[in-house]
Image (tube, grey):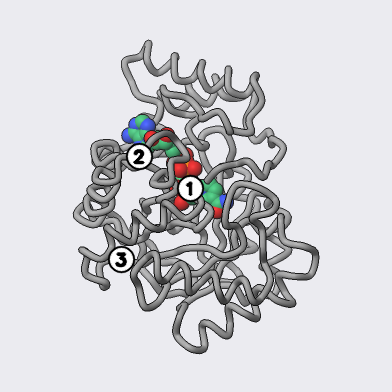
Amino acid sequence: MKYRLLGKTGWKVSVLGLGASPLGGAFGPVDEKEGIRTVKTAIDLGINFIDVSPHSGSTRAESILGKALREIPREKFLLATKVGRYGPGAKDLDYSASRVIAGVDESLKRLKLSHIDLIQCHDIEFAPPGMLAEETLPALQKLKAIGKVRHIGITGFPLEALKKATEKGTLDTVQSYCHYCLTDITLVRLVQHLKTRNVGIINASPFAMGLLTPKGPPVWHPAPADYRDVCAAAVEHCRKRRRELPKLALQFATSNRDIATTLVGTSSAKKLKQDVAWIEEPIEEGLLAEVQQVLKPILNRPWAGSLETAP
Ligand code: NAD
């Protein structure tokens, strides 16, 4: 496993991080024991960065993760979770200071931890205007001062929102999803802005939330039908060439040195072992060029963000 520096946190994080939203059922039913095994496998394979949120499975992902973490020495992992989203709908959004403070305590309890390494304001595009600066972040700063959280970051889909929120350079990390993978590389437009402010870059969803896998995306996936068809054609192209699209997708997403870590979502120990083995191998440049050609019609094409976007 390779490790890269995550901005001003000073942490050396594994280039592959474990995204724990599938523990909440975002990609299908979850066997709790297998989920716990997956987390332990991650640590055994050298993964030291785990991301979750209370939103995933309406707190189920955090609860299962907590059961796994209590059996793992605390110094073996850096744990990132979120505030602001607590369930699937608009009614479950709350970025107020009081909810942030209560939310962190609830997450600590579910995760069975005494502190959170990285707390992130979840999907900042859904926060009411002004609230992030006036309530959410000041509340997180207070929690940092008393040691409940160590570093503060944000997550979200629209890159302009991430750019605006990091203008002052006070945040430690940014987590972007589906913007640095085979279908979309627009995160590179933000790299210089974040690097000059020493904001650590976390890249989520190397398979574009399932689009770049043979199983395909889950029903809640926001990509339109033609977008899905092009991804399915790329899967088929690799199948005919006796190759696997997820392997190429993961190698591609983890190859950019400006990105500290890429979060892969899985609740299967077997898949995670495969993921880690894949990134140890060099990328097949010829296959990459072929697949990029297949995906060209949709490259960097945005889809409408949606509250129903599960992870
Ligand atoms: P992803 O792109 O990692 O895709 C997950 C899918 O890939 C699952 O169906 C999984 O079974 C499959 N997969 C994993 N390994 C595989 C393998 N070897 N072979 C075939 N299929 C494989 O999507 P994701 O889970 O949405 O993203 C990863 C993580 O990023 C999340 O768990 C979460 O931690 C984070 N994330 C955060 C936000 C946010 O903050 N708004 C949004 C999206 C993702």
Q: Is residue 160 left or right of residue 52?
A: right
Q: CA distance from mark 2 to mark 1?
A: 10 Å
Of mark 2 and mark 1, the one earlier in the sequence is 2
| Up-down relation of residue 192 to residue 60 (above or below) | below
Confirm whether residue 258 shows in the render. no
Count neighbours of disc 3 (C-alpha within 10 A) and say few if under 14, some if 14 to 19, many if 20 or more: some
- The residue indicated by pointer 2 is 30
Residue furthest top in the image: 240
Task: Kindly identify the residue that appears in the image at 26 percent across and 73 percent down.
Answer: 75
Q: Are dots 1 and 3 in contact, CB under 8 Å?
A: no
x and y, in percent, of residue 44 in the image: 19, 55
Of mark 1 and mark 3, the one earlier in the sequence is 1
- The residue indicated by pointer 3 is 77
In which of the image's four quarters is ligand 1 placed?
top left
Q: The residue tagged with tag 3: helix, strand or loop?
A: loop
| Up-down relation of residue 214 to residue 74 (above or below) | above
Q: Quadrant of residue 115?
A: bottom left
Q: Is residue 296 left or right of residue 109?
A: right
Task: Kindly identify the residue that appears in the image at 54 percent across and 19 percent down.
Answer: 294
Residue furthest right in the image: 129
The amino acid type of the residue labelled 3 equals: Phe
- The residue indicated by pointer 1 is 57
x and y, in percent, of residue 250 in the image: 40, 39
| Up-down relation of residue 18 to residue 310 (above or below) | below
Depth check: give the residue in front, 202 or 29.
29
Q: CA distance from mark 3 to mark 2?
A: 22 Å
Name the mark nearer the viewer: 1 or 3.
1
The amino acid type of the residue labelled 1 equals: Gly
Query: Does any atom of ligand 1 lie closer than 8 Å to the CB of label 2?
Result: no
